[in-house]
Image (tube, rainbow, N blue to C red):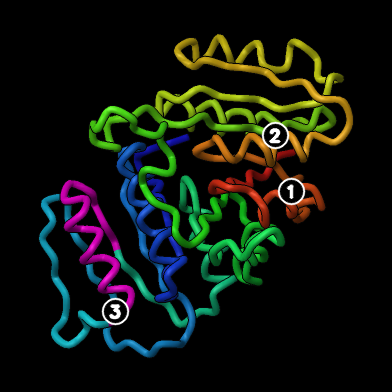
Amino acid sequence: MSTDTRTITVGIDGSRSSLDAADWAAREAQRRRLPLRLLHAGTEPAVPGGVFDIDDMGDIDVPAGRTRAALDRAAIELSYAHPALDIIARRTATPAVPALLAAAVEAETLVLGSRGRTGSAGFPVGSVALGVAARADRPVVLVRAGELPEDERVPVVDGSPPSTAPYLPVVLGLDPDASADDLIGYAFDTAAVRSAPLHVVHPWTLPTSTLRPWRHRYPGTTVREHRVDGDPGPRLLEASARAGLLVVGRRAGRGPGRAARSLIRHADCPVAVVPHD
């Protein structure tokens, strides 16, 4: 993956979930040392003007009268929270799904918000988020409303700042029937960027050689395999309660399967949907 031209891109629509997703995306951009791109798509709310950039020194060039717009507010708030981050805010009248799909082509990761938890039924995922996650050419991370920076780290018990705590594990759900190098590579890379352990949940039928080259490529990443009989979904859902990110795959050209959709709705942490062959 190139870090020269790609970005972490997040869709902004003014909702609480999209703003929490933008905060998660800013942290991911900082971890990966990539620019953060904020994208508002569609025709509402109507906002005059075009594009403004926030450079890596935190300087802001915003046309007068636009600071109340959701996109502008998000960019300004994130620039104060992450002053060294290169932030680019853009708006397009193109409908949300095609605009986000086009943006994903140039993104390392596309980040979208989902609404908050509503009890045992899980949390609803909007048609835009599901439509993009089902068709994007790049990984799409779905972040629920209310996600906080400390939620991706080990709980602090000694009074030290939460930002200094180690990251929680990255959990990968692996289908042994798929040729999933893109999926496995994304999970290993994400764990390495965070210096987090990687927990791989897969059926007993997974060949032992599947993960061997990745362990060699990422020798500093602690890998734990959890082999399960039957459907790994319940084990993945259980693991998500103690994870910083859940990574699941989908076949290129297809949407997420039933198991992946269930995990997207019910997982207790952000979910990355990664297309693979």
Is residue 180 left or right of 138 when viewed as pictured?
A: right
Q: Position of residue 85 (x, y in %)?
A: 23, 49
Mark 1 neighbour class, 10 Å CA radius: few under 14, some 14 to 19, many 20 or more? some
- Locate residue 220: give its quadrant: top left
First of labels 2, 1 by sequence position: 2
Image position of 75 with respect to 48: above or below: above
- Secondary structure found at label 2: strand
Q: Mark 3 points at which residue?
A: 50
First of labels 2, 3 by sequence position: 3
The circle on residue 173 is: 2
Please give the name of the residue rendered at 52% of the width and 15% of the height, measured from the top-left corner.
Answer: 222
Q: Where is residue 192 in the image (x, y as percent from the top left)?
A: 45, 24
Q: Position of residue 122 (x, y in %)?
A: 67, 59
Cα distance, mark 2 to mark 1? 9 Å
Q: Quadrant of the C terminus?
A: top right
Tell me, yes or no, whether the highlighted magenta stretch contains residue 83.
yes
Magenta highlight: main SS: helix
- Judge depth for marks 2 and 3 and give the one in front: 2
Say which amino acid is labelled 1.
Answer: Ala
Please give the name of the residue rendered at 23% of the width and 70% of the height, measured from the top-left corner.
Answer: 52
- Locate residue 233: give its quadrant: top right
- Secondary structure found at label 3: loop
- The range drawn in magenta is 69-88
Tell me, yes or no, whether the highlighted magenta stretch contains residue 187.
no
Say which amino acid is labelled 3.
Answer: Gly
Q: Mark 1 points at which residue?
A: 260
Is residue 241 left or right of 227 when viewed as pictured?
A: left
